[in-house]
Image (cartoon, rainbow, N blue to C red):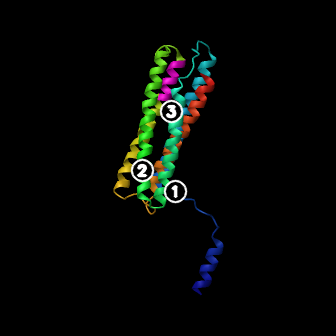
Amino acid sequence: MDTSINKEQQQLQPSIKILSMHPLKFALWLFIVTVVMIFAALTSAYIVRQSEGNWLIFELPTVFLYNTIILVASSVSMHLAYLAAKKDNFKSLKLFMILTAVLAVAFFVGQYEAWGALVDRDVYFVGNPSGSFLYVISGLHAFHLISGLIFILIMLFSAFKYKVHSKNMVKMEMCTTYWHFLDGLWVYLFIFLLLNH
């Protein structure tokens, strides 16, 4: 009798598949959406202000291109670290995490060089709005990238303590997602600035 009641209850309940997400991943995605909105607002304001005139036209330093290549390479090494963690390949995990951190630092150095090259071209933060927008956009992205680098260093420390492995992947997945997002964001910003400088 109990069995027949259970079958009837199951038939009455609608077959709804519940989508679940880890709370930390959900928080990360909310943060990512916020960052997207900030940069969407900035790039929209850039276009509106550019159309009003009094806009300094200048060539972007080539260093920005090199920085983009470095960041794409760091995204590849981050993904390889993620795959190594899934396979419990701790040696490769540490190696690729270190490589990702080194490439991130190289990007920061490159951005500093790019800002120096802009100054050499008489493009300053204060002055023409085109320069101001460029410094704000690239600087704000660099600020977010610092948080990504800190996340990478935390995961690297965890990897050396063998806390990152196939059965404990939540934070590694979050770190990888965030880093890929920041890299993709910079590629978008670089192409946007290249087409609208």
Asked if residue 131 is among those painted magenta in the image, a careful observer would answer: yes
**CB atoms at circles 2 and 1 under 8 Å apart?**
no
Q: Amino acid at mark 1?
A: Met
Can you identify the residue that label 3 sits on?
Answer: 67
**CB atoms at circles 2 and 3 under 8 Å apart?**
no
Dot label at residue 90: none
Q: Is residue 58 left or right of residue 31?
A: right
Q: Position of residue 156 (x, y in %)?
A: 38, 50
Residue ID at (61%, 19%): 50
Most frequent secondary structure within the magenta stretch: helix
Front residue of this view, candidates 138 and 107? 107
Q: Position of residue 85 (x, y in %)?
A: 46, 57
Dot label at residue 95: 2
Residue ID at (50%, 15%): 121
Q: Residue furthest bottom?
A: 1
Q: Quadrant of residue 189?
A: top right
Residue ID at (48%, 53%): 82
Q: Is residue 60 left or right of residue 120?
A: right
**First-in-chain label (1 vs 3):** 1
Residue ID at (39%, 42%): 150
Kind of element beneath mark 2: helix
Residue interval drawn in magenta: 130-138
Q: Amino acid at mark 2?
A: Leu
Q: CA distance from mark 2 to mark 3?
A: 21 Å
Q: Nearer the viewer, mark 1 or mark 3?
A: 3
Q: Nearer the viewer, mark 2 or mark 3?
A: 2
Kind of element beneath mark 1: loop
Dot label at residue 21: 1
Q: Amino acid at mark 3?
A: Asn
